[in-house]
Amino acid sequence: MANTVTFNRIRSAYAGTVIYPANGRYGPRVQEDIQLVLLHSGEMSIEIDDEVHEITPGSVVLLKPGHHEQFIFSSKGETWHRWISIHIEDLSEAEKDYFEELPLYQRISEEMNRLTDLMLSVQYAHPSESDLLRSLGMSAILLYVSEMSRTRALEEIHPSILTAKSLIHSTYHEEITLTMLAEHAGVSPEHLVRLFRIGEKTTPIKYLWHYRVLKAVEYLTHTGLSITEIAIRCGFKSTFHFARMVKKKMGKTPTEVRQFSWKGNPIDKA
Protein backbone atom coordinates (compact mmCIF):
# COMPACT_ATOMS: atom_id res chain seq x y z
CA MET A 1 0.00 0.00 0.00
CA ALA A 2 3.02 2.26 -0.13
CA ASN A 3 1.87 3.96 -3.33
CA THR A 4 -1.65 4.79 -2.21
CA VAL A 5 -2.36 8.50 -1.92
CA THR A 6 -1.99 10.47 1.30
CA PHE A 7 -4.97 11.98 3.06
CA ASN A 8 -4.02 15.58 2.20
CA ARG A 9 -4.18 14.78 -1.52
CA ILE A 10 -7.84 13.75 -1.31
CA ARG A 11 -9.97 16.77 -2.19
CA SER A 12 -13.43 15.25 -1.67
CA ALA A 13 -15.38 12.02 -1.32
CA TYR A 14 -19.03 11.11 -1.49
CA ALA A 15 -21.32 8.12 -1.92
CA GLY A 16 -24.46 7.54 -3.96
CA THR A 17 -27.12 4.98 -4.71
CA VAL A 18 -29.39 4.52 -7.72
CA ILE A 19 -31.83 1.98 -9.16
CA TYR A 20 -31.92 1.96 -12.97
CA PRO A 21 -35.00 0.75 -14.85
CA ALA A 22 -34.68 -1.89 -17.56
CA ASN A 23 -32.45 -0.82 -20.47
CA GLY A 24 -30.78 1.90 -18.41
CA ARG A 25 -27.56 3.48 -19.66
CA TYR A 26 -24.98 5.92 -18.31
CA GLY A 27 -22.25 7.64 -20.32
CA PRO A 28 -20.09 7.72 -22.29
CA ARG A 29 -17.97 9.78 -19.93
CA VAL A 30 -14.37 10.28 -18.84
CA GLN A 31 -13.77 9.09 -15.29
CA GLU A 32 -12.39 11.87 -13.09
CA ASP A 33 -12.11 10.06 -9.76
CA ILE A 34 -11.13 6.87 -8.07
CA GLN A 35 -14.57 5.27 -7.90
CA LEU A 36 -15.84 2.09 -6.29
CA VAL A 37 -19.08 0.79 -7.81
CA LEU A 38 -20.99 -1.82 -5.79
CA LEU A 39 -23.43 -3.86 -7.89
CA HIS A 40 -26.14 -5.30 -5.64
CA SER A 41 -28.74 -6.62 -8.08
CA GLY A 42 -29.51 -6.78 -11.78
CA GLU A 43 -26.89 -6.77 -14.53
CA MET A 44 -24.19 -4.31 -15.52
CA SER A 45 -21.78 -4.07 -18.44
CA ILE A 46 -19.01 -1.48 -18.27
CA GLU A 47 -17.19 -0.48 -21.42
CA ILE A 48 -13.78 0.90 -20.47
CA ASP A 49 -11.65 2.23 -23.32
CA ASP A 50 -13.63 0.11 -25.83
CA GLU A 51 -13.26 -3.09 -23.76
CA VAL A 52 -16.49 -4.53 -22.32
CA HIS A 53 -16.57 -6.07 -18.83
CA GLU A 54 -19.58 -8.05 -17.59
CA ILE A 55 -20.08 -7.49 -13.86
CA THR A 56 -22.08 -9.87 -11.69
CA PRO A 57 -24.16 -8.87 -8.64
CA GLY A 58 -22.17 -8.92 -5.42
CA SER A 59 -19.11 -7.36 -7.06
CA VAL A 60 -17.37 -4.07 -6.31
CA VAL A 61 -15.61 -2.46 -9.28
CA LEU A 62 -12.59 -0.16 -9.00
CA LEU A 63 -12.66 2.56 -11.67
CA LYS A 64 -9.61 4.73 -12.28
CA PRO A 65 -9.33 8.32 -13.55
CA GLY A 66 -8.66 9.15 -17.18
CA HIS A 67 -10.53 6.23 -18.75
CA HIS A 68 -13.52 6.45 -21.12
CA GLU A 69 -16.50 4.60 -19.63
CA GLN A 70 -20.03 3.64 -20.56
CA PHE A 71 -22.49 1.66 -18.44
CA ILE A 72 -25.25 -0.55 -19.83
CA PHE A 73 -27.73 -2.06 -17.38
CA SER A 74 -30.06 -5.06 -17.52
CA SER A 75 -32.70 -5.26 -20.24
CA LYS A 76 -34.76 -7.64 -18.08
CA GLY A 77 -35.46 -5.50 -15.04
CA GLU A 78 -34.10 -3.05 -12.51
CA THR A 79 -30.43 -2.78 -11.55
CA TRP A 80 -29.35 -1.42 -8.18
CA HIS A 81 -25.86 -0.16 -7.56
CA ARG A 82 -24.12 2.17 -5.13
CA TRP A 83 -20.81 3.97 -5.41
CA ILE A 84 -18.08 5.80 -3.56
CA SER A 85 -16.20 8.51 -5.45
CA ILE A 86 -12.86 9.87 -4.22
CA HIS A 87 -11.48 12.95 -5.98
CA ILE A 88 -7.69 13.09 -5.75
CA GLU A 89 -5.41 15.95 -6.65
CA ASP A 90 -3.17 15.11 -9.65
CA LEU A 91 -2.10 11.48 -9.36
CA SER A 92 1.57 10.91 -10.11
CA GLU A 93 2.57 8.41 -12.77
CA ALA A 94 3.69 5.99 -10.04
CA GLU A 95 0.32 6.30 -8.32
CA LYS A 96 -1.53 5.81 -11.60
CA ASP A 97 0.52 2.68 -12.30
CA TYR A 98 -0.23 1.40 -8.80
CA PHE A 99 -3.99 1.72 -9.23
CA GLU A 100 -3.88 0.28 -12.75
CA GLU A 101 -2.28 -2.88 -11.38
CA LEU A 102 -5.13 -3.47 -8.93
CA PRO A 103 -7.88 -5.90 -10.01
CA LEU A 104 -10.88 -4.36 -11.75
CA TYR A 105 -13.34 -6.02 -9.38
CA GLN A 106 -13.74 -8.36 -6.43
CA ARG A 107 -16.52 -9.55 -4.15
CA ILE A 108 -18.29 -6.98 -1.97
CA SER A 109 -17.41 -7.56 1.67
CA GLU A 110 -19.67 -6.83 4.61
CA GLU A 111 -17.16 -4.19 5.69
CA MET A 112 -17.37 -2.42 2.31
CA ASN A 113 -21.16 -2.48 2.54
CA ARG A 114 -21.05 -0.97 6.02
CA LEU A 115 -18.59 1.71 4.96
CA THR A 116 -20.88 2.68 2.08
CA ASP A 117 -23.86 2.74 4.46
CA LEU A 118 -21.92 5.04 6.79
CA MET A 119 -20.95 7.46 4.04
CA LEU A 120 -24.50 7.65 2.74
CA SER A 121 -25.71 8.31 6.28
CA VAL A 122 -23.28 11.03 7.35
CA GLN A 123 -22.83 12.97 4.12
CA TYR A 124 -26.15 14.78 4.51
CA ALA A 125 -24.69 16.60 7.52
CA HIS A 126 -21.11 16.90 6.26
CA PRO A 127 -19.83 18.31 2.95
CA SER A 128 -17.87 16.07 0.61
CA GLU A 129 -14.76 18.21 1.26
CA SER A 130 -14.94 17.63 5.03
CA ASP A 131 -12.23 15.72 6.87
CA LEU A 132 -14.83 13.10 7.81
CA LEU A 133 -15.91 12.28 4.25
CA ARG A 134 -12.35 12.47 2.93
CA SER A 135 -11.15 10.06 5.61
CA LEU A 136 -13.98 7.64 4.83
CA GLY A 137 -13.08 7.87 1.14
CA MET A 138 -9.48 7.04 1.91
CA SER A 139 -10.67 4.16 4.10
CA ALA A 140 -12.63 2.80 1.14
CA ILE A 141 -9.49 2.72 -1.03
CA LEU A 142 -7.42 1.09 1.72
CA LEU A 143 -10.18 -1.44 2.39
CA TYR A 144 -10.34 -2.44 -1.28
CA VAL A 145 -6.56 -2.93 -1.39
CA SER A 146 -6.53 -4.80 1.92
CA GLU A 147 -9.32 -7.14 0.86
CA MET A 148 -7.55 -7.86 -2.41
CA SER A 149 -4.44 -8.93 -0.47
CA ARG A 150 -6.51 -10.95 1.97
CA THR A 151 -8.36 -12.73 -0.84
CA ARG A 152 -5.08 -13.70 -2.48
CA ALA A 153 -3.75 -14.99 0.85
CA LEU A 154 -6.90 -17.03 1.49
CA GLU A 155 -6.65 -18.61 -1.95
CA GLU A 156 -3.42 -20.24 -0.79
CA ILE A 157 -5.07 -21.85 2.27
CA HIS A 158 -6.80 -25.22 1.99
CA PRO A 159 -10.62 -24.78 2.06
CA SER A 160 -10.98 -27.32 4.88
CA ILE A 161 -8.67 -25.25 7.08
CA LEU A 162 -10.68 -22.11 6.38
CA THR A 163 -13.93 -23.92 7.17
CA ALA A 164 -12.59 -25.34 10.43
CA LYS A 165 -11.18 -21.98 11.50
CA SER A 166 -14.48 -20.28 10.71
CA LEU A 167 -16.28 -22.67 13.07
CA ILE A 168 -13.70 -22.01 15.78
CA HIS A 169 -14.01 -18.24 15.40
CA SER A 170 -17.80 -18.30 15.65
CA THR A 171 -18.27 -20.94 18.38
CA TYR A 172 -15.05 -20.87 20.44
CA HIS A 173 -17.10 -20.37 23.61
CA GLU A 174 -18.83 -23.72 23.09
CA GLU A 175 -17.61 -27.30 23.40
CA ILE A 176 -15.68 -28.14 20.23
CA THR A 177 -14.01 -31.44 19.41
CA LEU A 178 -11.67 -32.53 16.65
CA THR A 179 -14.43 -34.75 15.28
CA MET A 180 -16.82 -31.80 15.08
CA LEU A 181 -14.23 -29.68 13.26
CA ALA A 182 -13.43 -32.48 10.82
CA GLU A 183 -17.11 -33.13 10.04
CA HIS A 184 -17.68 -29.43 9.48
CA ALA A 185 -14.63 -29.27 7.19
CA GLY A 186 -15.67 -32.39 5.25
CA VAL A 187 -12.53 -34.43 5.96
CA SER A 188 -11.42 -37.08 8.43
CA PRO A 189 -9.93 -35.98 11.77
CA GLU A 190 -6.55 -37.39 10.76
CA HIS A 191 -6.56 -35.52 7.46
CA LEU A 192 -7.56 -32.25 9.14
CA VAL A 193 -4.65 -32.60 11.56
CA ARG A 194 -2.28 -33.14 8.64
CA LEU A 195 -3.67 -30.09 6.81
CA PHE A 196 -3.24 -27.90 9.89
CA ARG A 197 0.29 -29.14 10.50
CA ILE A 198 1.23 -28.25 6.92
CA GLY A 199 -0.69 -24.99 6.58
CA GLU A 200 -0.78 -23.60 10.12
CA LYS A 201 2.22 -25.33 11.78
CA THR A 202 -0.07 -26.49 14.59
CA THR A 203 -3.04 -28.80 15.19
CA PRO A 204 -6.74 -27.87 15.06
CA ILE A 205 -7.16 -28.24 18.83
CA LYS A 206 -4.02 -26.25 19.62
CA TYR A 207 -5.30 -23.55 17.28
CA LEU A 208 -8.64 -23.59 19.14
CA TRP A 209 -7.01 -23.05 22.53
CA HIS A 210 -4.69 -20.40 21.11
CA TYR A 211 -7.71 -18.52 19.77
CA ARG A 212 -9.53 -18.85 23.10
CA VAL A 213 -6.55 -17.35 24.91
CA LEU A 214 -6.44 -14.43 22.45
CA LYS A 215 -10.14 -13.70 22.99
CA ALA A 216 -9.68 -14.00 26.75
CA VAL A 217 -6.82 -11.48 26.67
CA GLU A 218 -9.10 -9.08 24.78
CA TYR A 219 -11.68 -9.39 27.58
CA LEU A 220 -8.99 -8.95 30.24
CA THR A 221 -7.58 -5.79 28.69
CA HIS A 222 -10.75 -4.13 27.38
CA THR A 223 -13.47 -5.08 29.90
CA GLY A 224 -13.97 -5.29 33.66
CA LEU A 225 -15.54 -8.76 33.52
CA SER A 226 -14.48 -11.12 36.29
CA ILE A 227 -11.89 -13.83 35.68
CA THR A 228 -14.57 -16.48 36.16
CA GLU A 229 -16.92 -14.84 33.65
CA ILE A 230 -14.15 -14.51 31.05
CA ALA A 231 -13.17 -18.16 31.50
CA ILE A 232 -16.77 -19.23 30.89
CA ARG A 233 -17.26 -16.94 27.89
CA CYS A 234 -14.09 -18.21 26.22
CA GLY A 235 -14.78 -21.93 26.62
CA PHE A 236 -12.31 -22.83 29.37
CA LYS A 237 -13.06 -25.83 31.57
CA SER A 238 -12.32 -24.01 34.83
CA THR A 239 -10.66 -20.87 36.16
CA PHE A 240 -7.59 -22.98 37.01
CA HIS A 241 -7.41 -24.24 33.42
CA PHE A 242 -7.90 -20.68 32.19
CA ALA A 243 -5.11 -19.32 34.39
CA ARG A 244 -2.73 -22.09 33.36
CA MET A 245 -3.33 -21.53 29.62
CA VAL A 246 -2.97 -17.75 29.88
CA LYS A 247 0.22 -18.10 31.94
CA LYS A 248 1.66 -20.51 29.37
CA LYS A 249 0.86 -18.21 26.47
CA MET A 250 1.46 -14.77 27.99
CA GLY A 251 3.99 -15.47 30.76
CA LYS A 252 1.60 -13.80 33.21
CA THR A 253 -1.52 -14.78 35.14
CA PRO A 254 -4.85 -13.34 33.97
CA THR A 255 -4.78 -10.81 36.82
CA GLU A 256 -1.22 -9.79 35.95
CA VAL A 257 -2.16 -9.40 32.27
CA ARG A 258 -5.03 -7.11 33.23
CA GLN A 259 -2.95 -5.02 35.65
CA PHE A 260 -0.10 -4.75 33.15
CA SER A 261 -2.48 -3.55 30.42
CA TRP A 262 -4.44 -1.15 32.60
CA LYS A 263 -1.20 0.60 33.55
CA GLY A 264 -0.85 1.58 29.90
CA ASN A 265 1.54 -1.14 28.78
CA PRO A 266 1.05 -2.78 25.37
CA ILE A 267 0.14 -6.46 25.34
CA ASP A 268 1.93 -8.66 22.83
CA LYS A 269 -0.65 -11.21 21.65
CA ALA A 270 1.41 -12.71 18.83
Image (cartoon, rainbow, N blue to C red):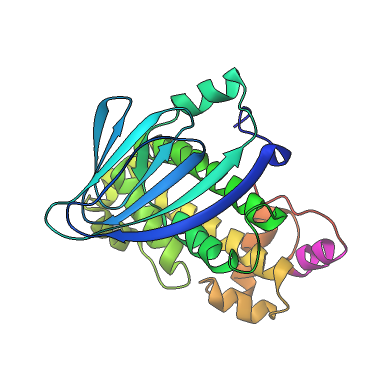
Task: Judge whether 1 appears above or below 216 on screen.
Answer: above
Looking at the picture, does residue 89 appear above or below residue 58?
Answer: above
Q: Majority secondary structure of the magenta segment? A: helix
Q: Quadrant of residue 215?
A: bottom right
Q: Residue at x 58, y 25 (%)?
A: 95
Image height check: is 119 above or below 103? below
Seen in the image, is 71 located left or right of residue 86?
Answer: left
User: Residue 118: x and y, percent?
Assistant: 54, 64
Q: Residue at x 52, y 74 (%)?
A: 237
Residue 202 appears anywhere in the view: no
Q: Residue at x 54, y 68 (%)?
A: 121
Name the residue nearer the viewer: 171 or 253.
171
Residue 172 is situated, as x and y percent measured from the top left of the image, at: 46, 66
Magenta residues? 255-263
Residue nearest the observer in this picture, 183 or 14: 14
Q: Position of residue 173 (x, y in %)?
A: 48, 72
